[in-house]
Image (tube, rainbow, N blue to C red):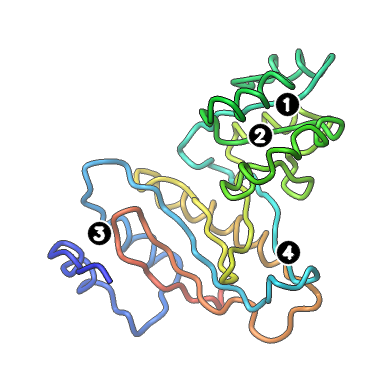
Amino acid sequence: MAKKTKRMNELLSKVDRTIAYDLDEAIKLIKELSNAKFDETVEIHARLGVDGRHADQQVRGAVVLPHGTGKTKKVLVIAKGDKVQEATEAGADYVGAEDMIERIQKENWFDFDVIVATPDMMGLLGRLGKVLGPKGLMPNPKSGTVTFDVGRAIEEIKAGKVEYRLDKTNIVHVSVGKISFEENQLKENIKMLMDTLTKAKPSSSKGTYYRNVTLTSTMGPGIKLNTLKF
């Protein structure tokens, strides 16, 4: 286990680890504790009362945050025909088909954040599953990245659409903005995410859904949130 720095110990001393903070208090605190020399990313880490090993308890999808994430994502579109022009006009950073797939394969090229693909291209893209899967880059219908409506998909991603999915420990990790955001902007983004996660609760999930929800920034301590408000 890495030794905590003096700076981190000082920050931790300002957070009461025995209580769960209301959202307004947590946002105010996380902004007060930020003293990094860059604009830190603010994230939500939610441990859910589900078992992702079972298909009927998977929690995965996407949501457009009202104030975006503070980062403009680079979008690669895998498509052919008239969808190429549609993608270009919608603001895709890269558009192609076999050429782009080959570039990823041969050049280990990953200068993009999201891949949007039309359903007819998934057969070709599937051969990159072992490469894209571990990086969380494989398009998926549940996240809206496998679609013929590529224009809308790109616009939503550029507007601040984020994906959420369970990791192996049943935790969802999602960026909800930057530390430079106004408090009300962070609050509205977080509420939108949590409302979406609540609606995504599997019907087969029993007991407490939100086991633990933590708000954190890139260089700051985790602040436990009061889940009764979600």
Q: Which one is closest to the eye, mark 2 or mark 3?
A: 2
Q: Which one is closest to the eye, mark 3 or mark 4?
A: 4
On screen, 195 above or below 22?
above
Under mark 3, the amino acid is Leu
Cα gap from disc 2 to disc 3, whole angstroms: 35 Å
Under mark 4, the amino acid is Ala
Residue 111 at x, y percent in the picture? 51, 28
Q: Nearer the viewer, residue 78 or 25?
A: 78
Circles 1 and 2: CB distance less than 8 Å? yes
Question: Which structural element holds mark 1?
Answer: strand
Residue 7 at x, y percent in the picture? 15, 61
Going by the image, does 187 lie left or right of 205?
A: left
Going by the image, does 95 lie left or right of 167?
A: right
- Which residue is most to the front? 106
Q: Which one is closest to the eye, mark 1 or mark 4?
A: 1
Q: Quadrant of the N terminus?
A: bottom left
Under mark 1, the amino acid is Ile
- Label 3: which residue? 33
- Label 2: which residue? 115
- Which residue is most to the right? 120
- Label 4: which residue? 200
Mark 2 or mark 3: name the one nearer the start of the chain: 3
Cα gap from disc 1 to disc 3, whole angstroms: 42 Å
At x 45% / y 66%, what residue is drawn?
23
Going by the image, does 83 lie left or right of 48?
A: right
On screen, 52 above or below 42?
below
On screen, 230 above or below 142?
below
Query: Residue 78 shows which numbered tag?
Result: 1
